[in-house]
Image: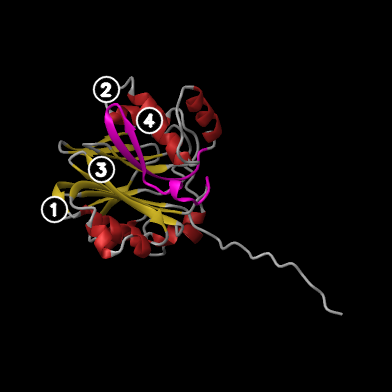
Amino acid sequence: MTENHNIIPARHIHEECGVFGIFTPQEADVASYAYYALYSLQHRGQESAGIVVNDDGLFRSLRDTGLVSEVFPPEQLKSLGKGTIAVGHVRYGTTGSDNKRNVQPILVNHFKGRMALAHNGNLTNSRELRQELESRGSIFQTTTDSEVIAYIIVQERLNRGSIEEAVSAAMDRIEGAYSLVLSSPTKLIAARDPHGFRPLCMGHLKDGSVVFASESCALDAIGAEFERDIRPGEIVVVDTAGVRSDTSHCGKAPKKLCVFEFIYFARPDSVI
């Protein structure tokens, strides 16, 4: 007698997302730096990839589903042009579907200009924040936590003197795991949740460029020197005035770096 069994294909195990950001003292091919960094972070997300280049406040983006090599063929990558800031992301969708609308970095227009945000992690109060924002008129284009974070920052920006103050205020409201890089028209900002669930490190190039990445292997890929990890709860701001750090959220919660970063998520050659 022949037995028929319904076999359900197992979904492959996926990694977390990977983020990258670079600020250069002079206009440069920042898209290429982002490309090679994301290529080295491909193990953290295979669903989609995106790069946003900031050229003196003009944002150019290339984002799509697929691997880094598929999303950024040479001619397409070249179309991003030069700039002083770039933000990049590779995604495994831990929240939201895997459709093209959820591809990061998230781009948001607001009354102070534009913002590009790339985020790794999960919020535990995303639903409540989304409902609150929608009740105040926000219209979401994606189903991701990342857009919730972006809108919270924009909302806080209404009553704050700077984008970094808005990020700090947003960190008082969002809960869960997040390591993010954000480009405003003139600044690159990196932030890590007070628990330090997800990794985020900082380095620099010989020309003085400052870079942030989920793992140090991305710094190695572009010839950057590893400087240090971003502290849990820390906000680092980079602009033409230099690099400054806000540690007001540091020490507010016990450190809880995810153990899977050591045994599964991160590359073995990364410093975590």
Mark 1 or mark 4, whichever is nearer to me: 4
Mark 4 is on which residue type?
Ile
Q: CA distance from mark 3 to mark 2?
A: 22 Å
Q: Which numbered marker is on residue 59? A: 3
- The disc, 3 or 2, on the residue closer to the chain's N-terminal end is 3
Q: Which numbered marker is on residue 69? A: none
Residue 138, image x, y percentages: 45, 28
According to the picture, the residue beneath numbered tag 4 turns out to be 153
The local crowd at label 1, few if under 14, some if 14 to 19, many if 20 or more residues have their Cα within 10 Å, is: few
Mark 3 or mark 2, whichever is nearer to me: 3
The quadrant in which the C terminus is found is: bottom left
Q: CA distance from mark 1 to mark 3?
A: 23 Å
- Check residue 222 for magenta coloring: no
Residue 43, image x, y percentages: 43, 62
According to the picture, the residue beneath numbered tag 1 turns out to be 207
Mark 2 is on which residue type?
Gly
Q: Is residue 161 above or below residue 222?
A: above
Q: CA distance from mark 1 to mark 2?
A: 31 Å
Q: Are marks 1 and 2 in contact (CB under 8 Å)?
A: no
According to the picture, the residue beneath numbered tag 2 turns out to be 161
Magenta-colored span = 95-123
173 displayed left or right of 78? right
